[in-house]
Image: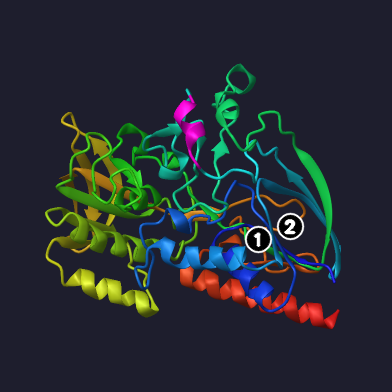
Amino acid sequence: MNPILIIGGGISGVTAAVELAEAGKEVILAERTSHLGGNVVKMHNYFPKLCPPACGMEINFRRIRNNTRIRVLTHAEVLSIEGVTGEKRVRIKISGKRVNDLCTACGECVEVCPEERPDQFNYNFGVTRAIYMPYPLAFPQKYEIDTHYCKGTGCAKCAEICAYNAIDLEAEDKVMDIDVHSVIVATGWENYDPSKIDGLNYEKSKDIVSNVEFERLLSVTGPGKGKLLRPSDGKAPGSIAFVQCAGSRDRNYLSYCSAVCCSASLKHALNVTEISPETRVDIYYIDLRVTGRNEDFLRRVENIDRIGLVKGKVAAVDVAGNNELIVAFEDFKQHRKMKVGYDMVVLATGIISAGDIPGLFRNEEGFYKNQQQEGVYPVACAKKPMDVSSSVKDATSAALLAMKEDRIK
């Protein structure tokens, strides 16, 4: 019986993998980066329980380590998918792994590395060495080399000091064909580029950040180590504005609602009151779209004096001479245009489908359609915006569907 292939090692892909494997199915989990975890491991916490990502993901990583039915492929890019359910042929490119599975994560290579790179895990808030640990609880727990910044044969200090022969600076790419039963597409999401949105001036100030960047600023594993600090000067902000629907529900950028932004900003506001009690917060919104258990966040926010909910459309964010950020908006309730100054501005930008699997069909919004070629099942944010809880449920549903088709065949 051929294994089931899962493309994407975020929360959805990991969930589908462990559910299938623990039900007795062979699984191949293919992730394009060097590690599993996706976007969830970058979060400070996630709703509805406000759990830190290490809580749930570490348990799932342990389930993967302890299950021989799961084969993990990292640095894996799917080039093609062909065939019918039960007899699908998938071509995958594996980029050369310059740090192999012999790595013990001792860290001696980092000590001798002379090159730096932007810390992409922390959205470029700071730098790491060219050889680095992707994040503290990374799985697999081994170092990675950024070939764009590593000088390769001109240096090789990391390879020279490694006592375990875990570093191969000449590792080459390879292409492999695998036979699988079916394919679950869990390629996840990425944030819409806020620099594309006219008037919000994202690139003009370090203190204008996106909602995902703000997650890292809040996180205990982020640049502030649990303290909320402005990127420009390292000081605690006295005031923060959250701009909802930044580019969303707008025919010029994203025509759709990303479903999670309102709940995320309410969560962020509550996080701020806990981490930085002196900071004032205003949330500028068109509509607050929260449902189910996430309505609890709205009720909690409404009872906190230091959080303001302003029903209005933000037209622009300008940078004043003293680095104050001026939010210009139309107040829908007072029917007038206003301007207010802040120390930081957080843009609640929407999410778009990540990854590009050849041969799959997308809808007009760029997400994968439900109906694909036989035996291919897009899940969670690959097909539409979802929060973590909904993504986990959808991944479990896809696992059940793949098992049902397995029995039929």
Q: Quadrant of the N terminus?
A: bottom right
Magenta stretch contains residue 108: yes
The residue at the point 24 percent across, 75 percent down is 299
Chain part drawn in magenta: 106-113
Q: As displayed, is residue 33 above or below residue 17? A: above
Can residue 105 be seen here?
yes
> Does the image show residue 380?
no
Label 2 is placed on what type of residue? Leu
Q: Where does residue 139 sit, x and y in percent of width and height? A: 55, 54
Number of on-image labels = 2
| Residue 259 higher or lower than 208, as above or below | below
Which numbered marker is on residue 360? 2
Give the quadrant of residue 72. bottom right
Residue at point 67%, 32% (across, down): 168
Where does the image place residue 63, in percent across and percent down from the top left? Answer: 58, 68
Q: Say whether residue 63 is magenta.
A: no
- Is disc 1 placed on a helix, strand or loop? loop
- At which x and y percent is residue 164? 62, 38
Of the numbered discs in the image, which one, if any, rests on residue 168?
none
> Which numbered disc, 1 or 2, marks the residue that appears first in the sequence?
2
Instruction: Assess whether mark 2 and mark 1 are in contact (beta carbons under 8 angstroms).
Output: yes
Q: Position of residue 290 (x, y in %)?
A: 36, 72
Which residue shows up at 68% across the image and 74% down it?
A: 20
Q: How crowded is mark 2: few (under 14 residues within 10 Å), some or many (20 or more)?
A: some
Residue type pointed to by label 1: Tyr
User: Where does label 1 land, which residue?
Assistant: 368
Rendered view: 162 above or below 14? above
For the residue carrying disc 1, how many other residues have a C-alpha within 10 Å: few (<14), some (14-19), or many (20+)? many
Residue in view at x 71 percent, y 52 percent: 357
243 sits left or right of 403 in the view: left
